[in-house]
Image (cartoon, helix red, strand yellow):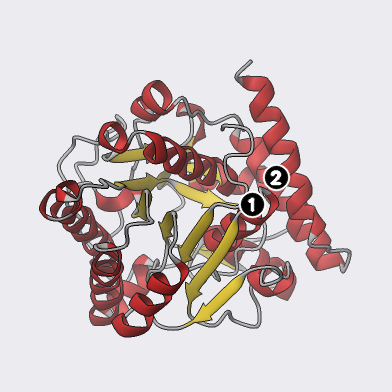
Amino acid sequence: MKKNFWKKKKVFITGHTGFKGSWLTLWLKKLGADVSGYSLKPKKKSLFIDANISNGIESNYENILNFGKLSDKIKNFSPEIVFHLAAQPLVKLSYNNPRKTYSTNIFGTINLLESLKNCESVKSIIIVTTDKVYENRQTRRGYNETDMLGGYDPYSSSKACCEIITNSYRSSFFEKKGWSPGIATARAGNVIGGGDYSEFRLIPDLFKSIQNQKVLKIRNIKSIRPWQHVMEALKGYLRLAEQLYFNSEKFSEAWNFGPNKEGCKDVGWVLSQFRKNWNFSISHVQQNNVYESDILKLDISKAIKELKWKPILSLNEAIDLTSEWFRKKLSGEYSENILLDQINSYEQRYIESIR
């Protein structure tokens, strides 16, 4: 990251009240960026509230499907860099409400791109999708960015659609502009970290069961996923935005951000590591005909080679950082400074790793 690159940069973030959005907003504030967020109102139990993320930024609490509001906010703010994180992000909820999932994820992305078509201030646009956009072939090798898109469930397929839509807008509209903004998609693995209260996710469910002294219900303990700390993925997004800013033609593509091979573990292994410091019991529940892939891995060699980004935390370190946050939260010792301390430590370690 170039020194002081983010200072006073005007950054627009959709979904800034969510888990990833809260971490990203806090990080950008620390770097000196001028942040404007656009999202639904945060839930009372959220990292956004816990860490006072709203301090020092502009927050617009609106629905991404309100094109008029979104377009006006972008026009008035004139952003230089845009991160699109607003979405219905859960596979299980996408089965329960596919119409809402497709509407939010697909038309929300279209609304954003339409709002940016004539925004001449913008230089970098990051559309965040998911590692689940690939056609599931149950392969043990990591999917790379040229593999076929697919998506069995409504969530995954909606995000694959966002990839296609982004490509279409890039070639149909953005590349024809004289100012040629960079526009890329980011496909990250399963992120963990302090402050995730989402439903139907392993780590939030784990700590909810610990706090409530209830049995943790697991759907498939043998499922293999690419686990990484949320800072690793966000570092990739930040790096990508910076590179797009200076060379839009070269970096306007799709990018995978995941862990090293050692970070691809099954659910049982992850739980065994948490068990070293936490007491909890688990039970297995039926899938209820909800399809989930047995194995999912990402090939991150392209980002390592071309973006000069790389993961630096082991999965055990990611687990320890996550446990640290929840331990202090559950014991009443929590301070928002814990996130900043973790970010500061991560940044220093990252600098040392590339020397």
Q: Nearer the viewer, residue 179 or 99?
A: 179
**Looking at the picture, which amino acid does disc 2 mark?**
Ile
Q: Quadrant of the N terminus?
A: top right
**Looking at the picture, which amino acid does disc 1 mark?**
Trp
Decide which of tag 1 and tag 2 comes sooner along the chain.
1
Please, is residue 136 above or below residue 285 in the view?
above
Q: Residue at x 53, y 62 (%)?
A: 21
Which residue is situated farthest in the left direction here? 172
Checking the image for residue 343, the label placed there is 2
Classify residue 30 as left or right of residue 192. right
Cβ–Cβ below 8 Å for labels 1 and 2?
A: yes
State the image quarter where residue 104 is shown: bottom left
**Residue 275 appears anywhere in the view:** no
Give the Cα separation between the discs numbered 1 and 2.
7 Å
Classify residue 80 as left or right of residue 66. right
Across and down, in percent, residue 116 comes to 30, 63
Q: Residue at x 64, y 15 (%)?
A: 355
Across and down, in percent, residue 304 comes to 42, 25
Please name the residue that numbered disc 1 is placed on. 27
Q: Residue at x 59, y 37 (%)?
A: 315
Binning the other alpha carbons within 10 Å of mark 2 as few (below 14), some (14 to 19) or many (20 upward) gives some
Please, is residue 93 above or below residue 231 in the view?
below
